[in-house]
Amino acid sequence: MHSAFGININLFEDTPRRDLTFIELADYDGFTAEQHYVTTEDGYILGLFRIPLNEKCTTSKGTILFMHGLYLSSDDCLVPGPGKAHCYIYSDQCYDVWAANVRGNFYGRNHTTLNPDKDSAFWDFDIDEMATRDLPAIIDYVLMISNETQLTFVGHSQAVTILLILCSKKPEYNANIKVGFGISPTAWLGNSKLIVVQFQGLLSKTVPDSVLSREIFKRGGIIQEPVKFICSLKELSYPLCSGAYFALFGYDNFQITKSVLPVVVGHTLSGTSVKNFLRWGQIHNIGFREYDHGTIKNLIIYGSRTPPEYDLSKVTMPWLFAGSHNDYVANVTDIQLLVTKLPNSSLCVLSDTTFGHLDFIYGKDIPNYVTPILLSYLDTGKNVCP
């Protein structure tokens, strides 16, 4: 069979979930979802989603907030589908589930006065603004609507970073977090094996300030669309798609299945700023420190040639971290360093050695190796490492 353009449509996989939004995905998968909006103190309007208490549940076990990683979005907690995805698993366990987004991603390209397509000032941000402006607004809103005083935070990669920064700079937020579950957490990146991280480290020293306030990795952009095409080819999709896609995030050929991978590609990349992209290069180079403005500005702002480390002694909330030796981004050695800096934290290194950086949110064995760490803690108060 051929389309009007002469292309044999039998060559393409049928991936109905690939291009659906959060609300559409939840509906397709048989769940109810709500869309909310949060406005930050500096005018960014962030999309926020809720999967309210499952109708089969008589009472709520509490509120869980899921936060995505770098270049990604709230869709991450739905992509693998029912029984596999984080937000669906927590909903099935009778939690009130929320999924948030940071400024500049697919659901965070709105502002009260700035146009992201015209105003470069919109893109003048990095993890520090996400931590001190986006996250407080999100947490305050979720607790208000849920009528709770605490929530459980589930964060992938960058999400862990921004909560660490928030609780370091605004320690009063420690009291709002029952426990933080950091999956593939990033703070120090000195031992990261991913070539993209090392490339970021190089670029962060050479890219001029004039290009920092721009968008990069937009959903539907010049990287994602060709990969989506490759990943839709029936016979070649899995080998070609996995090769192209994991060149950016780290190779994996085990946990993300043939049926889920095309859906993954439809929801990533989801955008950020060039400044934030290069901020991770700084972290790779100098550790988990404040923004590096260069020697002269550092002396003026910080009183030292190099930026100070974040004061993690102020992060008193409990943390559960999950890592893997196959994670090319969040190296176990770097996570162990993070644990030594925190007053109340523990690390589970997964016994399944196939888990890569994205498998913590898209892998087929999330319900076997990842979510039980958090759910057992919430049920018993004890740490269990599958």
Image (cartoon, grey):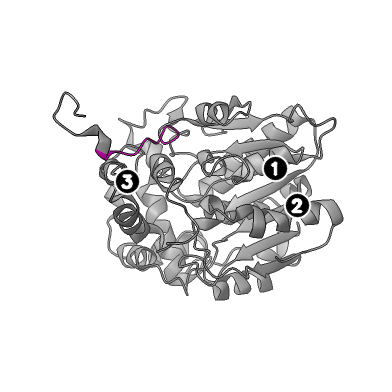
- Circle nearer the N terminus (1, 3): 1
Give SS at disc 3. Answer: loop
Q: Position of residue 232 (x, y in %)?
A: 31, 42
Q: Tell me if label 1 and label 3 are in contact, CB under 8 Å.
A: no
What is the span of residues highlighted in magenta in the rendered image?
11-18
- Tell me if residue 300 is in the magenta stretch: no
Whether residue 332 appears in this view of the structure is yes
Rendering coords of residue 184 (x, y %): 56, 61
Classify 6 as above or below 367.
above
Tell me which label, 2 or 3, sits earlier in the chain.
3
Side of 150 relative to 305 (left or right): right
Identify the residue under disc 2.
Answer: 375
Task: Check disc 3 and report the residue beneath it.
Answer: 231
- Image-based side of 44 in relation to 250, left or right: right
Position of residue 112 measured from the top left corner of the image (x, y, whole percent): 47, 24
Of the image marks 2 and 1, the number of the one nearer the N terminus: 1
Question: Would you name the residue on which mark 1 appears?
Answer: 90
Tell me the mark number nearer the camera, choosing from 1 and 3.
3
Residue 139, image quadrant: top right
Write the residue at 41% across / 44% down. 268
Tell me the amino acid under the disc marked 3. Cys
Where residue 345 sits: x, y (%)? 73, 65
Q: CA distance from mark 2 to mark 3?
A: 34 Å
- Sort mark 1 into few (<14), some (14-19) or many (20+) by Cα contacts within 10 Å: many
Mark 1–mark 3 distance (CA, rounded to whole Å): 29 Å
Horizontal side of residue 270 vs 382, given as left or right: left
